[in-house]
Image (tube, rainbow, N blue to C red):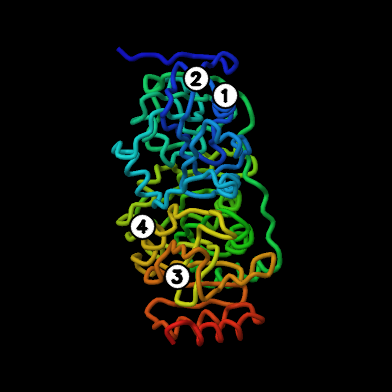
Amino acid sequence: MSRSPLVVEAADLDLTKWIRSGDRVMWPQGCAEPVTLIENLVRQRAAIGSVRLFLLLSFTELLRPEHADHFDFEGLGGLGTTSRLSRAGVLDPNPMHLSDLCLRLSTGSFPVDVAFVQLAGPDANGEYSPGVDHSYTHDLIAKARVVIAEVNSRAPVTTGVRPIRADELDVVVPSARPLPRMPVMEPDDDDRRLAAHVAGFITDRATIEIGVGTLPSALLPTLSDRCDLGVHTGLISDSVLNLIASGAVTNKYKPVDTGLSTGSAIFGTSPQAVDPRGLDIIMRPSRQVLDLPTLAGIPRFTAINTAVEVDLTGQVNAEYASGRYVGAVGGLVDFMRGAKASPGGRSIIALRSRTPRGTPRLVTRLAGGIVTVARSDVDVVVTEWGAAELAGKSVEDRVSSLIAIAHPDDRDSLMTEWATRPGV
């Protein structure tokens, strides 16, 4: 006989009954953060004792450095507002591929004791939807000792691999509050110049993967004239939703999820207003979205990602800047390798040639020696000054190609630094 979860109002939730000192607690990211549960955890942290929190991307400011009095902060890196924990020196980053993390969650080799999840529903059958984030929600629920669900009446119901049964949950906390919002990121003229160079690599019938930030906002509106595009991506942003709605995306030539756009999470400025069922979107766990044979089997799979900096041989740092972690490995390498293995696929690293403060982002040495992507995995690097196709090129040819797309005021110094580097 199936069991029913305990239903508890937020004001009556006593987490000391469920969380033990030393436990690892984890929850979905971005717009799917279970805000009510996290607020209770913060308030009750002294009574609970020391716990480990494994964090990914956050848009909220619920966790602060002073909460390290009882929390040990772990995570993939300094993603979103999590970066301020890194800046304060209280975040212990784990440089793990997202595919590897999700695989380890599914097998239990990366143990999580308590899962917080935000769900939508229930439906007429008493079942729930993971709402806006299917990345690893099912795996958390399957493997955690305790599952506490914030069932948010404002979370949209999304179509995924399967619904979540009531007997998979230990506690249900009802809520009706707005979902966390992704910050608005408005592109400027340099972003649009960068996007124009990236657009040259996106052909009709290409299937695209793209992250969040100003680049999608600048790039995706320019693709509405393409024919029969496909979407197979981790994060579906407002810009992706708009591209789908434009009619340019048909997913007609995708061999998997034909006719459907594929994603793991929906991150937007009004996530509770999204009805992905009207846009032919299928939500899948990251383990499926990042699967290398699946990606390699999609013709013209085009992965578009950003980075903190790139060195002159093509090594990519997407994690570390100004002495702190500001990003993560995430799914970057998974998508890049899938694109390179795809027939007609392209993998693009796009970045502006300088930071807002004027610091070069094409460099002879990466900050902190952090290499997120090996130079052997890099295909194309794009700045607002042009594109450098690196695959198959020697080191010296790579150097020349990358200097040619650096900021014009940095090119002479880069040539000098390269020529006078130790060992030359």
Q: 249 or 409: nearer the eye?
A: 409
Q: Secondary structure at mark 2?
A: helix
Quarter placement of the C terminus: bottom left
Q: Which numbered tag is attached to residue 15?
A: 2
Q: Is residue 314 left or right of residue 190?
A: left
x then y, percent, for residue 341: 33, 65
Q: Secondary structure at mark 3?
A: loop
Tag 3 residue: 315
The Cα–Cα distance between marks 4 and 3, rounded to whole angstroms, is: 22 Å
x then y, percent, for residue 173: 53, 20
Relative to 212, residue 360 above or below: below
The Cα–Cα distance between marks 4 and 1, rounded to whole angstroms, is: 40 Å
**Structural crowding at the residue carrying mark 4, measured as other residues with C-alpha within 10 Å and reported as few (<14), some (14–19) or many (≥20):** many
Tag 4 residue: 295
Q: Earlier in the sequence, mark 4 or mark 3?
A: 4
Q: Earlier in the sequence, mark 2 or mark 1?
A: 2
The Cα–Cα distance between marks 2 and 3, rounded to whole angstroms, is: 45 Å
| In contact (CB < 8 Å): disc 2 and disc 1 | yes
x then y, percent, for residue 37: 54, 26
Tag 1 residue: 40
The picture quadrant where one finds residue 297 is: bottom left
Residue 128 in sight: yes
| Type of amino acid under label 1 | Asn
Q: Earlier in the sequence, mark 1 or mark 3?
A: 1
Q: Residue at x 53, y 62 (%)?
A: 306
| Type of amino acid under label 3 | Gln
Q: Earlier in the sequence, mark 4 or mark 1?
A: 1
**Structural crowding at the residue carrying mark 3, measured as other residues with C-alpha within 10 Å and reported as few (<14), some (14–19) or many (≥20):** many
**Structural crowding at the residue carrying mark 2, measured as other residues with C-alpha within 10 Å and reported as few (<14), some (14–19) or many (≥20):** some
| Type of amino acid under label 2 | Leu
| In contact (CB < 8 Å): disc 4 and disc 3 | no
